[in-house]
Image: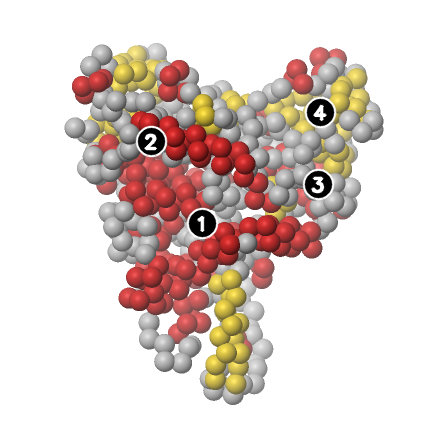
Amino acid sequence: MVQKVAVIGAGPTGLTSIKACLEEGLEPTCFESSHDIGGLWRFKEKPEPGRANIYESVVINSSKEMMSFSDFPPPAEFPNNMHHSEVLLYLRLYAQAFNLLQHIQLQTTVLSVRQTPDFTVTGQWEVETEREGGQRETHVFDAVIVCTGHFTQPHLPLRDFKGIESFEGRYFHSWEYRNAEGMQGKRVVVIGIGNSGGDIAVDISRVAEKVYLSTRSGAWVVSRVGPGGLPTDLVGTSRMDLMIQKLFPSRINKMVEKNLNKAFDHTLYGLKPKHGFFARIPVVNDDLPARIISARVQVKPNVKEFCGSSVVFVDGSAINKVDVVVFATGYNYSFPFLPSALQAKSGYRLRLYKHVFPPGLSHPTLAVVGFINALGAVNPLAEMQARWATKVFKGSSTLPSEETMVKEIQRDSATMHQRFSCSELNPLQVDYMPYLDSLAEQVGVRPNILSLLMKDPRLGLQVLLGPGTPYQYRLTGPGQWVGARQAILTQWERVVQPFRTRVVPEPETKPSSRLSIIVIFSGVTLLCCFCYKKLPLSSLLPHSSDLLSKLPGYVP
């Protein structure tokens, strides 16, 4: 029987895994190699080998409501898209609220995880650790959760760039970047247009003579600011939106791309990729188009070669007297402490059932949590993985046979490679809400929309037509949270709160005896024509609960 669980890593994934263990009555011990929690979101003044690093200007791409844990809404006063320091504060509040810190051993590195000699009987693991002073210990655990992420091993493909050894300037991987200090007046080439490449190009362009952003494939660029100034990821992410997208995938893809090109023409700006919008995670950047239109950033094709201080591109153009090159070329993923047999691949991805469990173990007592990628926030995905994994450990959820799991892994890999633009550096991608729902089904917490609409229409409409926030997965079933309903009904209030730094009075309007209200729920429009006397236009706020309460005869 599983009781003692080792959790490796105290970033967001590790923290939610500790909590999931506690919810199941398990005894977690978390090993964190650094001196503090936070993982990726703990800014480090100097790069620390083997650990994820971020730069000073990082702002999270997902809005606070979408990236929150399912039973811990962010404070209303927090900005919708938080600076990395605020994300770390949220994680500290989460750890304190659920008393997670007492289960974490800081400055303790995991050296190896291996099966005990009697694994076929017990399913136990030997975990060898080393403390900062060099003291080594071997512990025996009933189960292990790996939460080390995949932004720790920079991918620096120098062999792909002819003449790099003769380059007279400075070059480094984006993993080392902290800020634009030392870039004043320089000519800088940034290679790679992922989110880091876009951010760094913009950051440096504020002080450099010129920045050249080199991209092999292009990218779709999305702003954090959506329609009406609301967070982009709160629009078009409802369950109804998902149904429509599933029915008309090609049409929805064209519509999204058309709307993105209305903001700025991706072809004109040299950014249009060959892949469709949903085939790869887009670049989230509010400033890049403005830096391009002012020529502070120039978009260039792939680099062909380096010649002294010159950079030559595949179209024959060249930039002379380049001072700095930043390789924003992604990361390799590695789990050096795991046995090689557990690192087998299916295509580019790890061979894991539902991206969590190795299929070949006689006892399913090892899980990988947080090694996932989707068009959505990682925190809710990792939390649901952890909830499922701990239920499997506990025995309240069972896995299918090895043969069945292997077949499903192969099928999922084939489908994934058809739908998404996967590679060694982008090994996996899933559909955000369908993946969450598939795991929620295993846990027993998938919301029943029809039942909600019948029993609680106000809440049901929010779940169906509102943004797909994580609180939905605490409404029913194991781990049910009494505050989930209220969290959903008040989510728009928390969205609006940070904007209330200067309240602008609304102009008085004449009441209308007949009014057609267009209610917009997360990008899906419902036309509700009705008669209502003296309903002011100012009532049309992005609070669906307020709108519903104005419907004639509606009772919450």
Earlier in the chain: of badge 1 and badge 3, it is 1
Q: Which residue is mark 2?
A: 404
Residue 19 appears in the rendering: no
Q: Amino acid at mark 1?
A: Met
Q: CA distance from mark 1 to mark 2?
A: 33 Å
Q: Amino acid at mark 4?
A: Val
Comparing labels 3 and 4, the label whose residue is closer to the camera:
3
Residue 118 appears in the rendering: yes
Q: Which residue is mark 3?
A: 271
Q: CA distance from mark 3 to mark 4?
A: 22 Å
Pick whichever, 294 or 299, lies toward us. Answer: 299
Earlier in the chain: of badge 2 and badge 3, it is 3
Is there CB contact under 8 Å for labels 1 and 2?
no
Residue 180 lies, in percent from the top left, at 65, 33
Residue 157 lies, in percent from the top left, at 62, 19
Comparing labels 2 and 4, the label whose residue is closer to the camera:
2
Q: Which residue is mark 1?
A: 66
Earlier in the chain: of badge 1 and badge 2, it is 1
Q: Amino acid at mark 2?
A: Thr
Image quarter in which the N terminus is found: top left
Q: Amino acid at mark 3?
A: Leu
Q: CA distance from mark 2 to mark 3?
A: 42 Å
Q: CA distance from mark 2 to mark 4?
A: 51 Å
